[in-house]
Image (spheres, grey):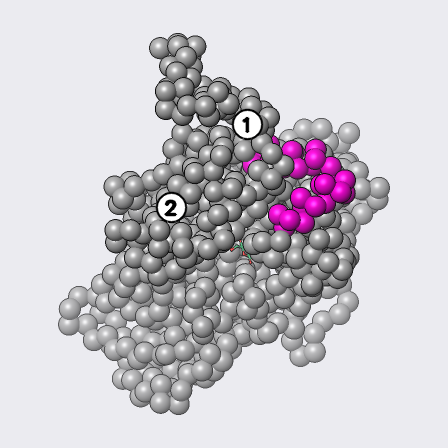
Amino acid sequence: MTAAIQRLILSALFVISMDGWAATASYLDASLSSDKRVELLMNQMTLDEKIGQMCQFVGEASDIDFDSKDTKSDYTLALGDRAGLIKEGKIGSFLKVSTYQEANILQSLAEESRLKIPLLIATDAIHGHGMYMGPTTIYATQIGLAASFEPELAELMAEYTAHEMRATGFQWAYSPNIEVVRDSRWGRIGETFGEDPYLVTEMGNAMVRGYQGKDFSSSTNVLASAKHFVGGGIAYNGVNGAPADVSERTLHEIFFPPFVGSIDNGVYTIMPAHNEINGIPAHAHEEYLTDLIRDEWGFEGFYVSDWMDIQRLESAHRIVDSEREADKVAVLAGMDVHMQGPGFFDNVKDLVKNGEIPVSRIDHAVSKILYSKFQLGLFENRYTDKQTVEATLLKESHLELALKTAQKSMVLLKNNGVLPLQQDIGRILITGPNADHQALLGEWARVQPHNNVITVLEGIKEQYAQGTKIDHVAIARHDVISSAELSRVGRLAKRADVVIAVMGENSLRFDKNKTSAENVDRPTLNLIGNQIELLQKIKASGAKLVVVLVNGGPIASEWLTENADAIVEAWEPGMYGGQAIAETLVGKINPGGKLPITVPRSVGHLQSFYNHKPSAFHRGGFYLSSRKPLYYFGYGLSYTTFDYSNLSMPETMSTSDSLSLSVDIKNTGDMDGDEVVMIYINDKVSTVTTPVRKLVAFKRVHLKRGEKQTLSFTIANKDFALLDRRMNSVIEPGEFEIIIGDRLKVATINAQN
Ligand code: BGC
């Protein structure tokens, strides 16, 4: 059938089914381009309907039994004013919607509005559709994915997460969080990709592609949201939302690149940060939101404000004295969607009527929002059903990937030979607050049904034949371990050959005892509470001490580094984390992850990151303490060994070229394993200071025992550039060191004009 005939039939159908409305409903013609449909629809919209698209509200998430008969009227009643607003076309999107039934009812209310514009339904689906009120697939959190150094994993995870979202009626993920972290006290590190701008960029780009596909036009794509622009990872004292005071140079070198990368990969929404940057709150930053991001970097999508952050221009930042002014400043700066609640609509309408916000600004915002709704296919199908939900959530392929994200994210920090644990190890004691706890799931996840999660205790039991003696001492809380618990551990450790202590943090969103998360920042980087006391008891028993860390932000404990026989950094490995950890401990998985963030010696050693400037430590040191971190970015051991050789690259290059090099890598140990080959460069002498080294390429490879591979890399020309004194990007002729991995194989190349 030709497009023209299809169009004819479609318009005939509108006439038959929709009567008078049909004459004006040309935007419903799915054969037209999304741009055309936006234009047609906007021609018919009133100012109220336009501003309505910029308004986001929260769902009811109540305990209504959606499976009972007459849910729509019960739910609509519970929605109160919001139900009427939807029908009047005064709400464009929702967040905090609980289930697919709720999503369907909201959409049906929107279909009762004059123009029948569907709603966008958003959620914080960052490592799985974790805020959904029902069982879903929960993968390792972002910091673990970063440790895998496999962007492909992140891409697939975002893709599968998008599938679960669309199946349940959600089309907008508030993810990825691509803030670079420079202060490990921040409670949100688990949802980030760590400290290195290049790694964060690669991971963020992969997630954007996974969520959005090519152009979010498939029924399994969702919109991504690159967040939070910018500087939350370096806010005062690591406190969420506190001011960020950071030089323009550091912004351009460290914090901006991941956002540029996401935009180049087509990210359609961006969320500004809670914080101010150098005196200007992110939500009011016209020079960034409009001049830099839209006009210079070419961002084509729309902005969504973060939770209450427009109101906070008045209440927290005090740059205006009323919410009306706050709304004005934010919209004029470039803000398109207001998260969340009433007030914004009336203020913006009044501001437009008064000539304080031009209609063109509203039109611009609305055209972007509507474009996404057309592209996503929501006008054609806004509903979902039970069958689709059941066929998609927790699919086999998703579960397999959940396990893989956990396996690939393990980082072995220390091993004095105790790992891998043998089958005839003797008696095992497993304990610690995370031994049998769903803190494995990390932030932005609800507690899952017990049977869907494998805890470390369960994972270990699975790895040992019946008859192996495995004791378990449950520890109730992360922050306070009782004396009864301590003495029980001490007693049982004495008869154990090895103790597996699963320690760390708890970032579960709805756990009242969480120790690190959004708005729960870390005043210490050490194990919190008296966890070290527990480890000391074990140490005193003489049993081997294997410590597994479950955490988002790095754990800095000199005692632990010196005294444990082995340390596995497991991050927040998701629903099958316990299986992956157990497989790692017994050697079925050879850990191949590397640190995506430096582990400092203590909180007092902050800021601590690998790509510091050359003079960072040229004079001072710390009182009675080394200035070296416990473990640098990129660190991670293996059960096998690797040897690098035959680095091949030219001795000179032109400043206008990229650099191609190759290197051989051989597995020289006794086990198959993964190695992450990392290439860093160091500009040896530069007219402005440059970091001692910066990561410019990496590749994770699997090598069988004895296997050798030749890996080739191309280092982009721009990676050799610096920002000169006038902030122009230039490549200065001279010598660059090329540093391979933490093996520090260094070669020098001379760049010539
Ligand atoms: C967080 C965002 C999140 C939003 C909606 C805010 O407090 O900063 O990252 O997307 O809440 O849940």
Q: Secondary structure at mark 2?
A: helix
* Amino acid identity at mark 2: Ile
Depth check: give the residue in front, 16 or 98.
16
Q: CA distance from mark 2 to mark 1?
A: 23 Å
Depth check: give the residue in front, 331 or 647.
331
In the displayed structure, does residue 653 sit left or right of residue 481? right
Taking the view exactly as shown, the residue that stands out farthest to the right is 726
- Asked whether residue 365 is drawn in magenta, I would say yes
Question: What segment is highlighted magenta in the picture?
Answer: 344-369
Who's the residue at 22% across and 63% down the image?
462
Who's the residue at 60% across and 57% down the image?
308
Task: Please name the predominant secondary structure of the magenta segment in the image.
Answer: helix
Residue 516 in picture, x, y percent from top left: 51, 68
Residue 612 in picture, x, y percent from top left: 69, 56
Q: Secondary structure at mark 1?
A: helix
Q: Quadrant of ligand 1?
A: bottom right
- Asked whether residue 406 is drawn in magenta, I would say no
- Quadrant of res 460: bottom left
Read off the residue under disc 1.
41
Residue 685 in picture, x, y percent from top left: 78, 46
Read off the residue under disc 2.
105
* Amino acid identity at mark 1: Leu
Who's the residue at 67% across and 28% down the image?
657
